[in-house]
Image (cartoon, grey):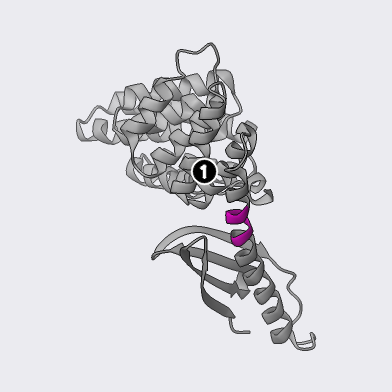
Amino acid sequence: MADIGLNQNFSTDSRDFHIQTATLVDEGLIRAEVFEKGRLLFVENYQYERRNFNQDVGPDSRLRKIVDQVHQSMIEEIDSLFEISEQIFGEKNATAHEKIGLVFLYMHVFDKAESHLQASIEINKNYYGSYIHLARAYFLQKRYNKAYELLSEITGKNFHYPDMYNLLGMINLEKKKHSQAFQYFKQALKYNNAYIEAYFNLIEAILQRMVSLKGEKKEQEIKKRISFLKILLKKIDNFGNAEDRKQSSLLNRVLNKLAIKKALKLVHDYRETNYIRHMPPEIIGY
């Protein structure tokens, strides 16, 4: 059976969007991709019940109906979100601003995310989660200095958010400050030893440093770091889900062959897909 697809332009809140919804029949998925001015904002995948197309009556018609329902519901949800956004701006509710700001953040509608998260902070300076989410919005736009400056406003406070330390580590990792990144990821894991994203981030920081060590032919140092990486991979096996464990096993095999650059690419791609660009289920639930 051939794949089915829909394309549509739509406008809301004086903004122009484009949505593409299509089936991936072999995988049993319907994928919706939303764009603004040619920039991909986010992707959502929906599983549908696959039937025996040889026995099913009108399978093509049935699937077209499901695709259309997904397509239209996505448009309605985005339209409703912008309406709710305007209503929230009329209220002084830090929690509401933070929650909808977080939804816009993971949709990569950064200007709206920033506006709501800034409003949340203005209403309640002690809403430290909003600082972290706003810093993440800056991070995703590669505004690393601005993200770091914002987090610096709360690092002296008497609280220890693993997410804050993890994000500080990610900022330093992007700036190739491996030692600082390493220390921040360790701090994140100190306060949450089951923080899988921080384990993968720490592994990438070590691998980036190992690539340069290999160029310097420091073989003994590389072996020590591989031993440490294997300890981290065991932690992922203990605390991670099935997909994390599968990635851990793959990285183990690659490291056994001393293929450092390949291991670095694997962990980098995994982080991008599963953490940095991933929309959490609880956000979809909003």
Residue 271, x across and y down, in percent: 47, 43
Residue 82 colored in magenta in the image: yes
Quarter location, residue 62 = bottom right
Which residue sits at x=40%, y=39%? 138
Number of other residues with Cα within 10 Å of mark 1, as a class: few under 14, some 14 to 19, many 20 or more: some
Q: Magenta stretch containing residue 75, yes or no?
A: no
Residue placed farthest to the left in the image?
216
Q: Nearer the viewer, residue 49 or 235?
A: 49
Percent x, y of residue 125 = 53, 22
Which SS class for mark 1? Answer: helix
Residue type indicated by callout 1: Tyr
**Rendering coords of residue 267 (x, y %):** 44, 43
Residue 206 makes an appearance in the image: no
**Residue toward you, 103 or 280:** 103
State which quadrant residue 240 falls in: top right
Q: What residue does disc 1 label?
A: 275
Q: Is residue 203 above or below residue 250?
A: above
Q: Is residue 174 left or right of residue 78?
A: left
Stretch in magenta: 79-83
